[in-house]
Image (tube, rainbow, N blue to C red):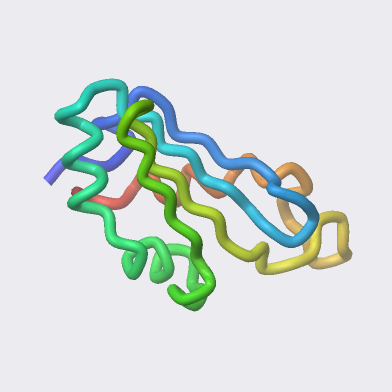
Amino acid sequence: MPELRSLVTKLRSKNAGPFWLTIDIFCGSPEAYARVRDGLSTTRVAQVFDTDGQAIKRFDIEQLHVVKFSLPRPAVQGSVTDRDMHGASWAALLGDVEI
């Protein structure tokens, strides 16, 4: 099975305020979008980020061929325990998921 990063045109993460992260998966084609939409469950994303799946918000945006996840940050942005001030490194973890 291929890794997510090999199926999509862009995979990025960023802050969605000091308490949330957003991960955007730009699929680039209807076929890639359908594969990601159907093959990447919210439960799997919760496992990757070691968080409660009920707290994750999922947005499947068919017109743009984008799948988006928003999840609570494990540490408040800028706090002593925050290891990624801008939220930019989280997408790399999701890129390794096989679909």
Please state which of residues 41 and 81 is positioned toward the viewer in this rendering: 41
Residue extending furthest toward the left: 1
Residue extending furthest toward the front: 63
Please state which of residues 37 and 49 is positioned toward the viewer in this rendering: 37
| Spot occupied by residue 78 in the image (x, y as percentages of width and height) | 86, 55
| In the image, residue 53 above or below residue 73 | below
| Spot occupied by residue 71 in the image (x, y as percentages of width and height) | 57, 61
**Is 59 placed left or right of 98 in the picture?**
right
**Is 54 placed left or right of 90 in the picture?**
left
Q: Report the number of numbered marks.
A: 0
Residue depicted at 51% across the width and 45% down the height: 23
Residue depicted at 41% across the width and 50% down the height: 94
| In the image, residue 9 above or below residue 37 | above
Quadrant of residue 35 within the rendered picture: top left
Residue depicted at 67% across the width and 68% down the height: 74
**Is 75 placed left or right of 3 in the picture?**
right
| Spot occupied by residue 57 in the image (x, y as percentages of width and height) | 49, 60
Quadrant of residue 58 within the rendered picture: bottom left
